[in-house]
Every structure is written in C-alpha cells, then in structure tokens.
Image (cartoon, rainbow, N blue to C red):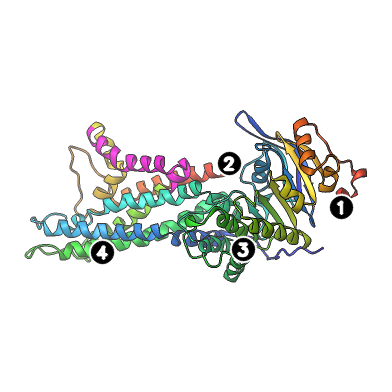
C-alpha cells in the first residue's frame, strides 16, 4: 500500500504540498483528484523520490522509494508524457529500463504488444504521437509487473478507443490486487474508472472517500467535486462511515 | 487477493546501472556519428599535415596527432549531451525511477561513457598516427611505435579524448543545460586557452587543450612560449584526470542533492 504522512514540499515561495496524509489500498483504482496546481504531480514525484520532501514521509509498502531493492519490479510510474529521448526507439527505451532491473528482454516485447506499440517500436520515439508516447509510458510502468502503479494523467492524448482501453486496463490491474493510484482532472473519466478517491487542493487533503460516497453529496460526481474544491473545506470520511478504510 | 510482483533476490547493483547506461548510449545514432566523425577528423588532419611536412626532424608523431584537438571538442560535447539530454528529454525521471541511487547512476554512466570514449579515442589516435606517417612525402621517414616516447604519445593522445569527454559529462551533470554546458566546455577548453596565452602565460600549461597538444602527445618535449614550461606527459595526464574527477564529483554531489 501507499502511505503518505504529513507530507510537505515547497518550491521557493510556493507551497506545493502542505501537510498531506492519505493511504492508497490495493484492489481498487484510486482516483487522485484536484484542480490544476493542487499538488498531485508533486505528491507523485515525492513518492518516487525524485524530489525530496521538506517534511513528512511518502512510503510504498512501508519503505521509502530509494530503499526498494528492485524499484521497477515493485512500482510502475507514468509521470509525464514523453519521459524518453526522442532519438531513441521505444524498444531501446524499454530495454534500458529492463537492463537496470534484470528484467528479461522477452518482457519488453510483451509490454510493447500489450500497449499496442509493437509495430512502431523500432522507430525514433520522437516521432510518436502524444497518445503513442503515453502508451510507451504505460509500457514502461508495466515492465516490471509491479504491485504498485502510479499514473499521472494517463489518458492525456489518448483517443476514445485508447481511453476505454486504459479504463479496462486500470480496473483489471486493480482487480489483480495491485495498488493503482491515478491522477486526473477529468472527473467524468474518474467516475467511470475509480472506486476510491483522494481529493486535494492547494496541497491539502479535501477528501479521502469513495466515488459512490462523494457522488451522493450532489447531483453528480462533477458537481460534488466542484463544490468540494470551491469551498476548500477539508472533508474526510470518518472511519465509522467508511468501513473500507480499515482494510489494510 | 494476490499481487504479482516478481520476487528477486538481492538488489540492483553497479552492473545493472552500467548495463542500462550501455543500452542508452548505444541506442542513440548520434553516439556512433560522433565517434565516426572524431576518428575521421583525426585521420584527415593527420594526412593533411603529413603531406605538407617539409622538416623531417620535427616531432612527426605530435604532428600526426594534431587532429585530436578537433575530435576532443566533439567528444566533450558527446559527454555533455550524455548528461543534459536526460534532463531536457525527461529521461532522467525514468533513469532515477529504475536506479534511485544517484551517485551510482553517475558512476555507471561515467564508466560506460569513459570506456567507449577511450576505445574510440585510441582508435582515432592510432589511425591518425599511421595515416599521418603514411602520408609523409618521399624521403621523410615516418615515426615508428618502437621509438622512444612514440607509443606513449599515441596512447595518451587517445586517453585525452576520454578525459575531455568525462569532463563534458561532469559539466553537463552540474549545469544540466546543453547550451550552457557546451559553452563552458568550449570556453574552458579552447577560448580560455587563447586568452590565457596572452594574459596569463603561467596558466597556459594547465589548460586542457595545451595539455593534450603539448604534454600528452609530444615525443620531443615542448618548452616554448617564452619561459613557460609545459607539463610532462604523465603530469599532464594527471591534470586532466583531476579536471574530470572534480567535474564528476561536483556533478554526483549536485545530482544527489537536487530535485530531479
């Protein structure tokens, strides 16, 4: 599971994450929602140890990311579209990551097929469309068959078919018992994909709840989300209301 | 509920990081172009200098290795790009997600790039030496590797490429911006050398380009330019190793300290 505890991070005068705490449990897709600049991407970067927190902890399976013995076998992450060199082929990009993690070459071909990039895998990745680039990012995340997935805006640039594919993929990964945290500001998509929700704004937690529960507070999930983030009021489902939270 | 994480004994080590860096280096076409042009430039200039040689008593080995200074710049820029292209493309995030131990990443990158640059550099130096010797006009005997100091000059000339490349890698890791790092490299290796000769001649022997041209690749010691004495070949090698080590050490420290 993912545990975020009193996490804070500032960049110069900007407070990106401000005393944030939440858990993400296996077995359900957890949507990570918030307006632009809410601190979603920063939280993911802190979870991956790319940035160092000013205070608090971000733990994966009880450990900090940099303590993981084989990180890509435990955590798969998609942080930004195009985190690859434009001059390198999609296959070579994945082969480099596989080499670092003692993952067999055959797994590279497997994930290329899984995300539908096998035909273009040998071409320069710089020529890939936004959606294709996003699929390469997903392939990299799935490479080590990890139990934890952190995906920042994974449907960005995907066509309708791709969005549906992603939704099915995320749900089946969660159904296999993995921890799946997916950030998005597409509320409608999250309503269809996620079961659990973590909502943040201005670096603070607004809600840690289920899609059903938050939707029930207004006419739609979107309405409820907008009300929640407009108020800026902290709302947290009490454990008594929400027995799922006690499942560890 | 089952999780499907593959359990593997042990943890990632230097060898895993080095394998990743080797795949990254070899999978860019620009790597092979740069190395090929470096070798071709060294050979081409060696031939041009050889053909135009009139004085058979000159340091013909040093002359044949004159083209190294062109390839040095390319190797330095390749080193810069090995570091900065990761930052400009965002690949650094993938790299550090796979190997979170940052000094280990840089050590692996330096080892892999250093060995590749050394192999290409030695190839360039030997090709230039033989091409330059073969291009000498009739009546001027080419130098032979068996003559005193000749093999040393050729081998150290090849090593100079690798060390300037590593200096570029270190600078690129420190400043992270391609244009700025290339500017620093060209300024430090070439421009300062020109100014230094005029303004502070005492510094001249320590400037990278002068070390390569007047210390590493000489058979007949150069003590010219007024009363300035150039470093011996081995002292010159030590100075270049020091430059690369300082740049890489600063890079490793900053890579570990800074947000990626």
Q: Are marks 2 and 4 in contact (CB under 8 Å)?
A: no
Which mark sits nearer the N-terminus, 1 or 3?
A: 3
Residue located at (43% from left, 57% from top): B113
Q: Residues within 10 Å of mark 1 (few under 14, many from 20)?
A: few
- Residues beneath discs 1 and 2 located on the same chain: no
User: Which residue is disc 3 drawn over?
Assistant: A115
Which numbered dot is residue A247? 1
Q: Quadrant of residue B143?
A: bottom left
User: Which residue is disc 4 drawn over?
Assistant: B127
- Could you tell me how far apart the alpha carbons at marks 1 and 3 are, in whole angstroms? 32 Å
Q: Are marks 4 and 1 in contact (CB under 8 Å)?
A: no
Residue A11, x across and y down, in percent? 61, 33
Residue B37, x across and y down, in percent? 30, 58
SS class, disc 3: loop
- Could you tell me how far apart the alpha carbons at marks 4 and 1 are, in whole angstroms? 69 Å
Chain of the residue displaying label 2:
B
* Magenta span: B169-198
Residue B78, x across and y down, in percent? 39, 52
Q: Are marks 4 and 3 in contact (CB under 8 Å)?
A: no
Chain of the residue displaying label 3:
A
Which mark is in front, 1 or 3?
Answer: 3
As drawn, is B50 to the left or to the right of B156?
Answer: left
Q: Is residue B189 magenta?
A: yes
Residue located at (74% from left, 62% from top): A172
As drawn, is A107 to the left or to the right of B219?
Answer: right
- Could you tell me how far apart the alpha carbons at marks 1 and 2 are, in whole angstroms? 34 Å
Secondary structure mostly taken by the magenta-highlighted segment of the chain? helix
Residue located at (51% from left, 64% from top): A120
User: Which residue is disc 2 drawn over?
Assistant: B259
Which mark is in front, 4 or 3?
Answer: 3
Which mark is in front, 1 or 2?
Answer: 1
């Amino acid at each position: 599971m993912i545990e975020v505890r009193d996490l804070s991070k500032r960049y110069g005068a900007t407070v990106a994450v401000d005393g944030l705490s939440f858990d993400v449990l296996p077995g359900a897709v957890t949507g990570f929602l918030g307006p632009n600049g809410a601190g979603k991407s920063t939280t993911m970067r802190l979870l991956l140890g790319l940035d160092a927190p000013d205070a608090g902890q971000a733990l994966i399976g009880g450990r900090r990311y940099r303590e993981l013995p084989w990180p890509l076998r435990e955590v798969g992450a998609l942080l930004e579209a195009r985190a690859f060199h434009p001059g390198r082929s999609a296959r070579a990009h994945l082969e480099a990551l596989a080499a670092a993690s003692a993952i067999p070459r055959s797994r590279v071909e497997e994930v290329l097929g899984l995300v539908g990039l096998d035909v273009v895998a040998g071409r320069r990745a710089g020529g890939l469309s936004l959606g294709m680039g996003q699929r390469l990012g997903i392939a990299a995340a799935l490479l080590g068959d990890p139990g934890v997935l952190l995906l920042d805006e994974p449907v960005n640039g995907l066509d309708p078919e791709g969005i549906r594919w992603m939704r099915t993929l995320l749900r089946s990964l969660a159904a296999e018992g993995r921890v799946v945290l997916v950030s998005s500001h597409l509320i409608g998509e999250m309503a269809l994909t996620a079961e659990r929700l973590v909502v943040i704004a201005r670096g603070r937690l607004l809600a840690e709840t289920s899609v059903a529960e938050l939707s029930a507070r207004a006419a739609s999930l979107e309405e409820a989300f907008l009300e929640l983030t407009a108020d800026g009021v902290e709302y947290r489902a009490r454990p008594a209301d929400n027995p799922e939270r006690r499942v560890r | 509920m089952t999780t499907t994480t593959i359990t593997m004994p042990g943890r990632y080590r230097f060898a895993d990081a080095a394998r990743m860096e080797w795949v990254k280096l070899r999978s860019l076409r620009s790597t092979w172009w740069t190395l090929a042009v470096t070798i071709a430039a060294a050979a081409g200039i060696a031939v041009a200098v050889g053909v135009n040689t009139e004085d058979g008593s000159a340091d013909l080995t040093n002359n044949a290795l004159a083209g190294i200074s062109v390839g040095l710049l390319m190797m330095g820029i390749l080193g810069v790009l090995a570091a900065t292209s990761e930052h400009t493309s965002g690949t650094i995030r993938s790299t550090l997600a796979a190997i979170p131990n940052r000094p280990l990443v840089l050590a692996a990158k330096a080892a892999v790039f250093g060995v590749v640059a050394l192999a290409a550099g030695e190839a360039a130096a030997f090709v230039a030496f033989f091409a330059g010797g073969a291009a000498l006009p009739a009546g001027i005997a080419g130098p032979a590797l068996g003559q005193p100091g000749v093999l040393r000059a050729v081998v150290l000339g090849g090593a100079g490429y690798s060390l300037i490349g590593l200096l570029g890698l270190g600078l690129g890791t420190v400043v992270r911006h391609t244009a700025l790092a290339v500017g620093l490299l060209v300024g430090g290796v070439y421009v300062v050398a020109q100014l230094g000769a005029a303004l502070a001649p005492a510094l001249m022997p320590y400037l990278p380009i002068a070390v390569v041209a007047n210390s590493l690749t000489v058979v007949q010691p150069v003590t010219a330019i007024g009363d300035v004495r150039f470093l011996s070949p081995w002292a010159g090698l030590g100075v270049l190793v020091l430059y690369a080590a300082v740049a890489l050490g600063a890079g490793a420290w900053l890579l570990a300290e800074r947000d990626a």
